[in-house]
Image (cartoon, helix red, strand yellow):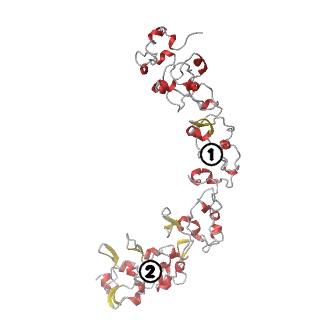
Amino acid sequence: MPVKGLHANPEYRKCVNCHSDHHGRNFKLIHWKEGEENFEHGLTGYQLEGAHAKLQCRDCHKPANIANQTVLLEKKKNLEQTFLGLQQDCLSCHHDEHRGQMKKDCLSCHNMDAWKPSPGFDHNKTRFVLTGKHRDVACEKCHPSVTDNRFPNDPSFLKFAVAKFAACTDCHEDVHKGQFGLNCTSCHSTAGWNQINEARFNHDKTRFPLKGKHRQVQCESCHKPGRPRRGLKFAKCTDCHSDFHQGQFAKRASRGACEECHSVEGYSPSSFTLEKHQQTDYPLLGAHQAIPCIACHAGGPRQKGASRSMLKVNRFTFSGTACQDCHKDPHFGEVDKYKQAKGCESCHAVESWRRVSFDHNQTGFELRDRHAEIACRDCHKPVAVGTPREHLQIQGLARDCQSCHQDVHQGQFEHAALVGGKTVRMTDCSRCHSAYRWQPDKFDHNRHSRFPLEGGHEKVPCQDCHPKAERNGAVFAVYKPLGTECSNCHGK
């Protein structure tokens, strides 16, 4: 049998090198040349490493750690003083922390530095590979502590032999109460309980199947962090969505149900059809049918009590249905006296704003002949141009001809007239002309002039007697003053 330990070294085979005798009963038999604390323990075949190097000799060399005390006692060895009898395996000095659950080769998991952690242990070599969040879980969370009181200083140990671990529910509570089966990995992964595998999770198995735009919504948008997955209200749209219309439809038969106008396929466009609008208090007629909804139901100011995120709310309740409730008055009050009965529709129609059916006789200026053929804007010109009050002038227009028409006779027929209490010079075109055409249909040369046309004069063209003249850059026919003597036209 080969010699082991310190005495196997050649320099320690002579007893007298370390042991001396005949120095009395109390003399120590071992002589430590460099001192006991400086002894090179590696010579024994067991190198002191890690925490072992920090221990005192008798911390290990004590009777409790001697494996076969009987042999040493038969050789009359003092167990309190001997350095013999120790084994090199860990369990010869340390108690089995795992109570036989692991192999006796402690260094396959632990090292000499400290009992914890155990760098040599690889959980992935067990029947349960740690992935995701399982890597961060403390051992005690899965391996419960069992008390057996076998060792006074270590009454309990961790139980590593877990009976069941094949299914997630062997360790975790099923928060869905079996609603989605027992295969948790069909939706979840060990990367995190809240990281749902959306491709594998079938929301249609819940009480709220996802349809339309709901399929594109992130889970966290409905299932807020910190809130339970179960028990969410979803019977009405407003259980999740704020009422964008702020109760404007609460008095309808549907109590403002969003489904009456919208669908899960998209909030816009609305499914409120023209046929439905015709059943409201304001049926759409004429050009109103071609107007986009937003043109009338534009966002108004934020209503009282509304959240700041809803700065504008589409308006669906109106104070009235008259034209001026939506449209500004383009006439700035100039036609108010003519719309007492029907309002704007006294002149306009909903088919087109420009279709005017006004009875001009109400103004005291009857439109006859050519006046009835011209456009309103030919007489009613814009005023306050370039300002917010720009509009067509309706009131205050003069009714005499020269206020609208140029005097082609250059004042030859002006006469004094009393207008508004004042004497002014004016020309009464109606004495000769009518509104039908510009020709002097009403002029009678025998009655209206000082020179009656008789005999050969009746067949003479006007321009033969009334020559052309020019004044202020304008060419006109001279009617007066002309002489009535023959010589004035025929010469001497």
Q: Is mark 2 on a helix, strand or loop?
A: loop
Q: Distance between the residues labelled 2 and 1?
A: 67 Å
In-image side of 8 versus 405 (left or right): right
Residue that lies at the very extreme toward the front in this rendered image: 24
Image quadrant for the C terminus? bottom left
Q: Note whether 97 is above or below 245 in the view shown.
A: above
At 49% from the left edge and 25% from the top edge, which residue is drawn?
Answer: 58
In this view of the protein, can residue 134 be seen by the observer?
no
At 61% from the left edge and 61% from the top edge, which residue is drawn?
Answer: 239
Q: Position of residue 69 (x, y in %)?
A: 59, 21
Q: Note whether 286 is above or below 16 in the view shown.
A: below
In this view of the protein, can residue 263 be seen by the observer?
yes
For residue 199, what is the image quadrant?
top right
User: Are there few (<14), some (14-19), or many (20+) residues within 10 Å of tag 2?
Assistant: some
For residue 408, what is the image quadrant?
bottom left
Q: Nearer the viewer, residue 254 or 450?
A: 254
User: Are there few (<14), some (14-19), or many (20+) residues within 10 Å of tag 1?
Assistant: few
Q: Where is residue 479 in the image (x, y as percent from the top left)?
A: 34, 82
Q: Note whether 366 is above or below 46 in the view shown.
A: below
For disc 1, the marked residue is: 198
Type of amino acid at the residue the image marks with label 2: Glu
Q: Nearer the viewer, residue 345 or 98?
A: 98
**First in residue order: circle 2 vs circle 1:** 1
For residue 243, what is the image quadrant?
bottom right
For disc 2, the marked residue is: 334
Q: Which of 122 and 51 is in front in this view?
A: 51
Type of amino acid at the residue the image marks with label 1: Glu
